[in-house]
Image (cartoon, rainbow, N blue to C red):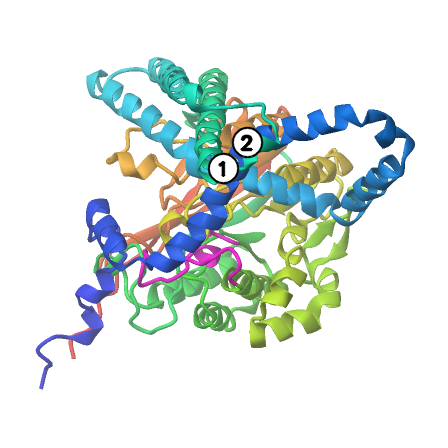
Amino acid sequence: MRPIVDPRQGDVEDDASSTKRRTLISLAGSLLAEISIPKLIAAWTMLIILPALLLGVAPLFASIWISTVSTKAAMLFTGLLPPLLLVILIGIGWFGGKPLWRLIETNFWSLNALAVQPVYAVSREALRQISEWFLPKTTDQHTRNLVRAISAAASGLLICGVSIWLVTLAWPGSRWTGSLSHLSSFSTLMHVALHNSVVIVAAYLAVAGLAWGLADATMIQPCDLTNFATTPADGKTWRVVHLSDIHIVGERFGFRIEGGRSGPRGNERLELLLAELDAIHARDPLDVVLITGDITDAGRSSEWAEFAEALKPYPRLAERTLVLPGNHDLNVVDRANPARLDLPTSPKKRLREIRALSTMVGLQGDRVRIIDDKTGKPETLLKDRLQAHVTEIASFADRGSIALTWTLANVWPQAFPMVLPPESDDGLGVILLDSNAQTHFSFTNALGLVTREQMKAVEKITAHFPKAKWIVALHHHVVEYPKPAKALSERIGTALVNGTWFVRKMQQLSGRAIIMHGHRHIDWIGACGELIIVSAPSPVMDVTDERDTYFYIHTLCVDGKGHLNLLQPERIVLPGHPIAES
């Protein structure tokens, strides 16, 4: 007897966080209804209110300190304070060092991700969509790029103008110098601190918005890649399978966060994919199977276990597979509830990092290496780098203690970039980046960032192998595609926060490197100048089981100019497989 409702088909609860089945307004309504008010207040206090108030009172305290110091200069310079301050500064530099700068950079870009980037992205993309409505479909690429550049500049000017207006409104209530008497009234101090913080943040927003707009407007605009290389005379090529966003779930009939019932059930499509790849490899050997993030749907242990189990029957594929983390692997707090957030002190984010890192060690730990800071050489295998932390990692995974959260804080950032060195001086290497921004909220999990520390490591390793060619892989898309979006929401908050900077830095590797990424589930092959960028479609997401999906095998070669280039990609279709009726 058939059930009234087939549980394999799911129900409305599977659509709780789905952007395919529910509108953003509906999701936002659920978020407001279910969010934990005490936890939200605590998070806002730690991440927004306290930093804003400290920013506002800093000028007052600085002026009071300078005034006090100026009256006692002789004592300060003849007493013990100078050597004491020197010892303190040396101690901060010695014990803080790179972790301190890493914390400063991460928080700086996190502020941009929450304050500047959404405002700028909404403004820029709204202007672009309005302008695209009036452009004829036959408009050439050069004109479209010009419109895109003008929209970026106009957006920056608009944000700058509004921010300056806010500065003028808050300025009368601000105060930048004071004395100890100003600290006696708490309400007065908070009033001044609030106005000061508005002035400072708005002034920064004015400068940052203008800088972002001009940077976007003046950078080389992305274009579709229409001319592919031909097979070189020496026949030297590399076959690379580029996969991304496979979103493994931990249940046989589980639905993904984004798709809900509009997406596939379980992991059968992944199993079909691996079987197809194994057959392809037997006919025509593959060099690399690259998965650019979102291996799991929410970074759960059961999902990583399913990934390992799926690869187990295919050792020939596993020994060629390289993975890197996506936002779903690290930043999803609760796959069923977008209103869930973690406090900055919560160990759960570290736990998701440890799960991902443990899987990477098991899969590629004896192949990828970590770059030495001093020499710039890939000297240490990933598994060896983590050997000193094995006991702590195991203990943390078992207990999740807050103390170990801080102890293991640097393990994750020090593991990136991971490098698969080229087999010869002029061979092909792979650099794996972590492009995930620090977030504590499921609703903002998609934000991306590439740190300056990682880019310095990329520069060192590519300089160490000057003749080698490279795949630079990350999860987030680095530029917005030069095509109209179906909805404004598709382009907001999902690209790298510092994408313009990243593309400019990568331009120095034009002809030597190809960027490969995922994140948007869209296939696109294009270029910024001579820098080729490849976005992978998801072979799993966005369709139900009976629909076909696809992925690409890319053939890389060195063309007649000595540049790393692409042959026409091979599209592999995965046929749909509806669940049989019971």
| Image position of 422 (left or right of 523) | right
Mark 2 and mark 1 in contact (Cβ < 8 Å)? yes
**Residue at the location (46% across, 63% down)?**
299
Secondary structure at numbered mark 1: loop
Task: Identify the residue position indicated by label 1 in the image.
Answer: 185
Placement of 102 over or under 319, stated as above or below: above
Report the disc number at residue 77: none
Above or below — where is 510 with respect to 98?
A: above
| Magenta range | 325-346
Could you tell whether 398 is left or right of 245 in the image? Answer: right
Name the amino acid, label 1. Answer: Ser
Specify whether residue 408 is in view.
Answer: no
Taking the magenta stretch, the answer to whether it contains residue 342 is yes
Q: Magenta segment, principal secondary structure? A: loop
Q: Residue at x 49, y 49 (%)?
A: 46
Of residues 274 and 528, the one nearer the viewer is 528
Q: Quadrant of the C terminus?
A: bottom left
Magenta-span inclusion, residue 68: no
Residue 156 can be seen in this image? yes
266 or 166, which is in the foreground?
Answer: 166
**Badge 1: few (under 14), some or many (20 or more) residues near its Cα, within 10 Å?**
few
Q: Amino acid at mark 2?
A: His
Q: Nearer the viewer, residue 567 or 141?
A: 141
Tell me the quarter of the picture where residue 342 sits: bottom left
Q: Position of residue 371 (x, y in %)?
A: 73, 47
Q: How far is the residue under mark 1 from the one under mark 2?
A: 7 Å
Outermost residue toward the right? 78
SS at mark 2 in the image: helix
What residue do we see at 10% from left, 82% from top? Answer: 2
Query: For mark 2, what is the residue?
Result: 182
The answer to whether 282 appears left or right of 252 in the picture is right
